[in-house]
Structures are given as structure tokens and as C-alpha cells.
Amino acid sequence: MDDKIAGADPRMNPQMDVQADLLAATFAAARQSPPEPSADFMARILAEGLAQQPPARAVAPAHDLGSGVGGGVLAQLLAMLGGWRGIGGMATAALTGVWIGFAGMGQLGDIAAGYLGTADALGTVDLLPDTDVLAMMLDQEG
């Protein structure tokens, strides 16, 4: 506490003891009966909150895929895969896989260099020398 800094000792001042006791009694009384908001206040808050909310929109009824109304097997498959957005994502992934499979992994560096520039412009660094590091280490140990 700051009592030592201020030079005051609370045990030496009886008026501070009385004030501390009054303060403790006030806090104890406040804990016994916490304040409750009035019903009128709560009703006003609720009315104001409801006035700020946007009105509810009508929800379109869901299509029953099992009844046969609204499409056949293709419509059910389309719905299971997430609609046209899901089909579009799957088609993109499939075409990318076919492209990578056809082009081969060796040519991906050439394709990336075509999009991003040359490897020198990217600042690539060769961290391993062309010689066999493991063979060099085995020769030094033995």
C-alpha cells in the first residue's frame, strides 16, 4: 500500500478505523441486496432492441429429393455434391490433376518460371552442393 510512502500508519489513526468499518458495513449491505433493474426499464430495453432488429424474411421450403418431384437421379447427385459450386470446384481440381499428370512434375518449374519470372529473379539459393555430401561425410569418419 501507499501508507508507508505517505507516512501514515492506519493503526495510529482511530478516525481511519471508523471510516474503514463504515465502508466495510456499506459493502456488506450492498452484497446482501444487489440492485435489480425495474420491470419498466427492462421492458423499454426489450422494445428498443426489437425495434432495431430487421424484419424476418420468409424461408423458401426445402425440396424433397426423395419424392421424385423436381428432378431425378442427376438432381439428387448434384444436391449431394453441393450444387453447382461444388461441381465447379471438383471439376477444377480434376482438370488441374490431369494437367499436372500430363505435363509431368519436371515441367512444373518451367511453368512456374513462366508465371513468376526466371529462377534468378526469384532469388533461389542452392543450399546443397552438387557433390554427394553423405559420401564426403562417410569418407571423413572412416
Image (cartoon, rainbow, N blue to C red):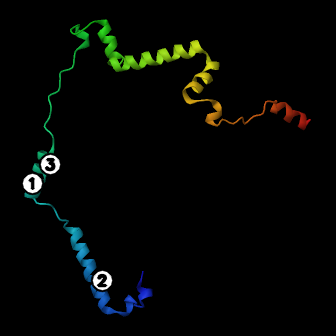
Task: Please tell me the numbered disc located at residue 30.
Answer: none
Image location of residue 58, percent across then percent down:
14, 28
Residue at x 14% of width, y 60% of height: 37
Reading the image, the residue beneath label 3 is 49
Residue at x 27% of width, y 6% of height: 72
In the picture, residue 6 is in which quadrant?
bottom left
Say which label, 2 or 3, has the lower sequence index.
Answer: 2
What's the residue type where badge 1 is placed?
A: Arg
Residue furthest out toward the right: 142
Query: Callout 3: helix, strand or loop?
Result: helix
Q: Residues within 10 Å of mark 2 (few under 14, many from 20)?
A: few
Proximity of marks 2 and 3: CB atoms separated by less than 8 Å = no
Where, quadrant-wise, is the N terminus in this rendering? bottom left
Query: Callout 2: helix, strand or loop?
Result: helix
Quick one: 34 or 70, which is closer to the camera? 70
Please, is residue 68 above or below residue 30 in the view? above
